[in-house]
Amino acid sequence: MKKAIIYSLTFLTWFAIVSQYFLMIDNRVASFTETTIRFISFFTILINILVAIYFTVQSINSHSKINAFFNRPGVLTGITIYITVVGLVYQIALRHIWEPTGLQRLVDELLHTIIPLCVIVFWYLYEQKSTVKWSSIPNLLVFPFLYLIYSLIRGSLFNYYPYPFINVQELGYGKVFVNSVIMLFVFAGISALFLWIGKRIQSKIR
């Protein structure tokens, strides 16, 4: 069963990522290069690429350094936390702002709903939860913080922000700062929740 889930998630995630890229290129309003940069500037895409790489590595039996890295304690938990935030933020803050149709709707649901749920299930079934420490929470906040800094710098240079809640041109720095602090608390809260759930599950197994 584990291998079936791994192979299915590998296929679904790469399919969704590649399809989304071609849809963006096909409907681009900027140059090919700029559209490509914008594509990989979405937190959703970056995390789904991370998910795809993780499950691709899991599907290949090897003793490589990348395999060792992705099998380190807490890596799956971190990926699960990130993809969970992707799903939650979309459902709460972004779903209502557009109504995709056709292939775009399928890809949208895969990236923001189906893949996050599948990763959560995989984490629940197979993560070695006892190895994940509370002290890892600050480390889990580093990537979202760096992403925020990158998005704000690039937005100020090219007048493009991937998400409306960090759009300085429309909201101003004050509101964006508040939104950013809220998002960091969301990441911290979801991280704490996963660690708490993991430790509760592990204690019951014992």
Image (cartoon, rainbow, N blue to C red):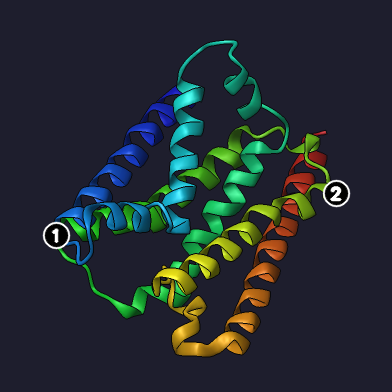
Q: Position of residue 69 (x, y in %)?
A: 65, 26
Residue at (61%, 52%) from the top-left corner? Answer: 81
Q: Secondary structure at mark 1?
A: helix
Under mark 1, the amino acid is Gly
The residue under the point 43% across, 36% down is 52
Q: Give the x, y percent position of residue 94.
A: 40, 74
Q: Is residue 157 left or right of residue 65?
A: left
Which one is in front, 199 or 81?
A: 81
Disc 1 marks which residue? 102
Residue 117 appears in view: no
Callout 1 environment at 10 Å: few (<14), some (14 to 19), or many (20+)? Answer: few
Amino acid marked by disc 2: Ser
Q: Which residue is mark 2?
A: 135
Question: Where is residue 44 drawn, in percent x and y?
Answer: 44, 56
Q: In the rendered view of the protein, which quadrant contains the C terminus?
A: top right
Q: CA distance from mark 2 to mark 1?
A: 44 Å
Instruction: Tell whether 178 sits left or right of 43.
Output: right
In this orientation, which residue lies closer to the viewer: 187 or 26? 26
Rate crowding at label 2 as few (under 14), some (14 to 19) or many (20 or more) other CA atoms within 10 Å.
few
Say above or below: 32 vs 130: below
Left of 71 or right of it: where is 92?
left
Task: Return the residue nearer the eye: 204 or 176.
Answer: 176
